[in-house]
Image: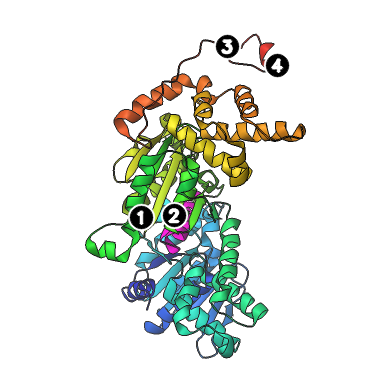
Amino acid sequence: MADYQNDINLKIKAGIPIIQIVSYEWRRIHGCLIRAARENKRQFFLWNNSEGIKKWNDIDRVFTPEKSDIREPEEALTWFQNAENNDLILLMEDLFVYFDSMQARQILGRLRIMPRISQNKSLVISQPFKSLPTQLEKDVYVLEIPLPDRNMLITDIREVVEELNLDENRAPDEDFPSIAESALGLTELEAKYAFKEISLAKNRLTKKEIPEIVERKEQIIKKSGILEYFHPRESFNDIGGLSNIKKWLNTRKVGFDPFAIEFGLTAPKGVLLLGVQGCGKSLVAKAIASEWNLPLLKFDLGKVFGGFVGESEANIRRALSIAEAISPSILWIDEIEKGLSGVASSGVSDSGTTARVFGTMLTWMQEKEKPVFVIATANNIEQLPPELLRKGRFDEIFFVDLPGYSSRQEIWKIHLKKRLGNRRYEDINFDLDRLAKESIWYSGAEIEEAINESLYIAYNQDREVNIDDIIQSLKNTYPLSKVMAENINNLRKWAKIRARLASDEVEETVATTTEKIPKLKQEVANPFID
C-alpha cells in the first residue's frame, strides 16, 4: 500500500477533523478515500457545486444522489455539522475557489469550528495546489499525493493489457518496468490513456511502443507551458574550450550509478554557470543530457507565476514533482536571474509571491532526495539573490568567460565542419591560427554568426566561401565585449574570488574602448542620448 494511503488511513483513524489533499488526480483522491472509508468503517460522501452531495455505494461501486439540492458550500458544511451519522467522511471538491469570494468569511468561520465536532467525522478538502487561508493553517492537515511511481504504472499496464485482451501481443513481464519508466512524470489517468490509445492503434503494447509513449509524455508536459522536454544531440565534442567544466562533469557522471551510491557517493546536485552571453552556457546544459544519457527538462521560471492565489506556488511544485518523477533527470533553468527578478521587493510588489516561489525552489534544491541534477545559467550576477549562491544549493559555480585563443581555434573548427562538412572543410584548408587571432574578444555565438554571414556572401556570388569572407564578416560585427567591456571586467573580478573558471586558458584583457558605440539613426537624433 502506498505511503500516502497509509497516511490518510491513520489521520482519519486518529480523528483529524480537516484534511486537505493536494493533487490534480481526482480519481486517485476518490480511490484513496474509498479505501480509507472501508479501512475505518466509515460512510463516504462527496460534495461539489454542480451535483450537490452524493454517497458512495460500495456494493454497486457508484455514487448515488444524497442531497442534490445542496449546491452552496455553507449548506454542505451545515449538513456535515448536523449529520446524525458520526461515522462519515465528506470530500468537498474545489472549495478553494470560494476562499476569495463574498462567502469566504462565513465558510472560514464554519471550518474553524470543525475541530470541536465529533472526532468520528472527517472533512476532506481537495484541490490541485497547496494553498490555505492563514486562519486555517493550524487546523488543517495537508497531504500531497505524488505522481505515480514505476510500480503503480506497471499495475496500470497490466490492467490495460487485460482490459484490451492483448495477451498475445503484449510485452513479457520483464519489459513492463521499461514501459512504465517511459511514462514517469504523467498523472495516472494521462499514463493510462496513453497506454490505451497506443494499444488500440497498434493492437499491442511492447517495448517498441516506448518512443510513442515518450512523445505523448513530451506533449503533455509541454502543455503546462512551464516545462519543455528536450532531446539534445549536442555532446562535449561540440563545445570548444571549457576544459575545466567538461572534466568536472565527466567526474560527476558516475554519481548516479547505484554502485557509486553504495560506495558512499551522493548524486550530484547541480551546477550554476555564470558568464558572458553567447559563450556556451546553454550548450553545456544540452551536452550534459547527451553525455549522461538522461532526460532534459527546460524550466521556464518566468511562466510559473499565475493570477490566482496559490497558483504560482502550485506551478513550481508541479514542475519540480515532474522532474523528480522522471529522475534521474536534468533540470535546466536558463537565465535564472530573469525569473527571480523582484525577489527583494516581493513583499511590496506582489504580496510575497515571488519570494515564496523562490523559497520553495531553494528548499527543494537543498533538501531534494531524488537524483535531479539542476543546471542554471545566468548572465548578470548582480540580479542573483545571494541565497542562491550559498554552498549546498549547487555543487559548484563556474564562470564562463570569452573564449581564449585555443578555444577560439576549436570553436572555428567545430562550426566550420558543422556547416561545410568534413570534405569541404579539408578542401578549403582554413587558417585557424589567423581566424583565432582575428576573433579576439568575440563570443562563440558571434563566431558562428560570422560563418553564417560569410556563407551568404559566397552563395550570392556563386562561389566557394573563403577565409577573407569570414574575416570581413567578423569586421562587420560589433562584438558584445566592446559594448560591455567594463561589465565583463567586473564580472571577472567577482568570479576570480567566488567561482571556478570553466576554462584553464589565460584570460585576454578586454580593453575598454574609447571609440563611440555605433547608434541607430533615431538615436543620433535624440538630444537626451550622449
- Count neighbours of disc 3 (C-alpha within 10 A) and say few if under 14, some if 14 to 19, many if 20 or more: few
**In this view, 335 is above or below 191:** above
Give the foreground label among 3 and 1.
1
**In this view, 407 is above or below 141:** above
Mark 2 secondary-structure assignment? helix
Q: Are marks 2 and 3 in contact (CB under 8 Å)?
A: no
Tag of residue 366 = none
Mark 4 secondary-structure assignment? helix
Asked if residue 320 lies in the magenta stretch, the reply is yes
Alpha carbon distance from label 3 to label 4: 16 Å
Residue 112 in percent (x, y) is at 40, 59
Q: Is residue 435 visible?
A: yes
Give the foreground label among 4 and 1.
1
Residue 281 in percent (x, y) is at 47, 40
Q: Which residues are magenta?
A: 312-330
- Count neighbours of disc 4 (C-alpha within 10 A) and say few if under 14, some if 14 to 19, many if 20 or more: few
Alpha carbon distance from label 3 to label 1: 47 Å
Q: Earlier in the sequence, mark 3 or mark 4?
A: 3
| Residue bearing mark 3 | 516
Identify the image quadrant of the N terminus.
bottom left
| Residue bearing mark 2 | 291
Alpha carbon distance from label 2 to label 3: 44 Å
| Residue bearing mark 1 | 253
- Magenta segment's dominant SS is helix
Query: In the image, what residue occupies the spot 41% across and 23% down?
Result: 508
Alpha carbon distance from label 4 to label 2: 48 Å
**On the rendered structure, is 491 left or right of 221?**
left
Mark 3 secondary-structure assignment? loop
| Residue bearing mark 4 | 522
